[in-house]
Image: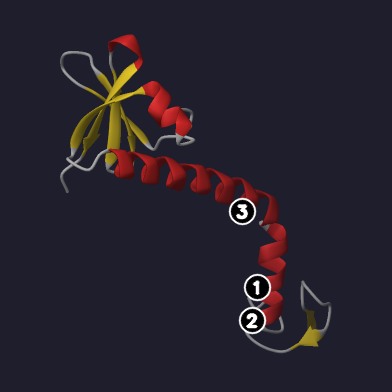
Amino acid sequence: MEKKCLECGEPFKGRVDKKFCSDYCRNSYNNRLNKDGKNLIRNINNRLRKNWRILEDLNVSGKTKMPKTKLLEKGFDFNYFTSIYVTKSNSTYYYVYDQGYLPLENDYYLLVKKNA
């Protein structure tokens, strides 16, 4: 039985489970298939990276108190973080990878860095 490449439609020979005539066609097919999802993921990763850089730049000592306005000035987006940590005393820390922040009173934030 002759198999046809899922991307270009050309006939090819090979293993029973082979679906593409070449690496180029396999890559083209998968890139086209995942394009929408990749754009979404790329945009989210860009926002996370920007947030991480802002926290890293502002928190040189590993623990700093910062007004919300300073974070917003730099373009920080509070909707994007990678994890949440709730302490025994019910304080909620938001983390962007190893850089975190804790909302305080009067629109201030405590910036912290997780020790690896």
Q: Which quadrant of the figure contains the N terminus?
A: bottom right
How far from the left and from the top, in percent, is residue 29?
71, 68
- SS at mark 2? helix
Q: CA distance from mark 1 to mark 3?
A: 14 Å
Q: Residue at x 76, y 87 (%)?
A: 12
Q: Residue at x 42, y 40 (%)?
A: 51
Q: Residue at x 67, y 74 (%)?
A: 26
How far from the left and from the top, in percent, is residue 47?
50, 42
From the viewer's perspective, is 60 left or right of 68?
left
Is label 1 or label 3 in front?
3
Question: Given contact means CB atoms under 8 Å apart, are the residues at marks 1 and 2 in contact?
Answer: yes
Mark positioned earlier in the residue sequence (1 or 3): 1
**What is the crowding at mark 3: few (fewer than 14 residues within 10 Å), some, or many (at least 20)?**
few
Residue under numbered circle 3: 38
Amino acid on which disc 2 is placed:
Asp
Residue under numbered circle 2: 23
Q: Nearer the viewer, residue 96 or 72?
A: 72
Amino acid on which disc 3 is placed:
Lys
- SS at mark 3? helix
Q: Nearer the viewer, residue 46 or 55?
A: 55
Q: CA distance from mark 1 to mark 2?
A: 6 Å
Question: Given contact means CB atoms under 8 Å apart, are the residues at marks 2 and 3 in contact?
Answer: no
Is residue 1 among the parts visible in the rendering? no
Q: CA distance from mark 2 to mark 3?
A: 20 Å
Residue under numbered circle 1: 27
Residue 89 against residue 3 in the figure, above or below: above
- SS at mark 1? helix
How far from the left and from the top, in percent, is residue 110?
25, 25
From the viewer's perspective, is 88 left or right of 104?
left
Q: Nearer the viewer, residue 92 or 101?
A: 101
The residue furthest bottom is 13
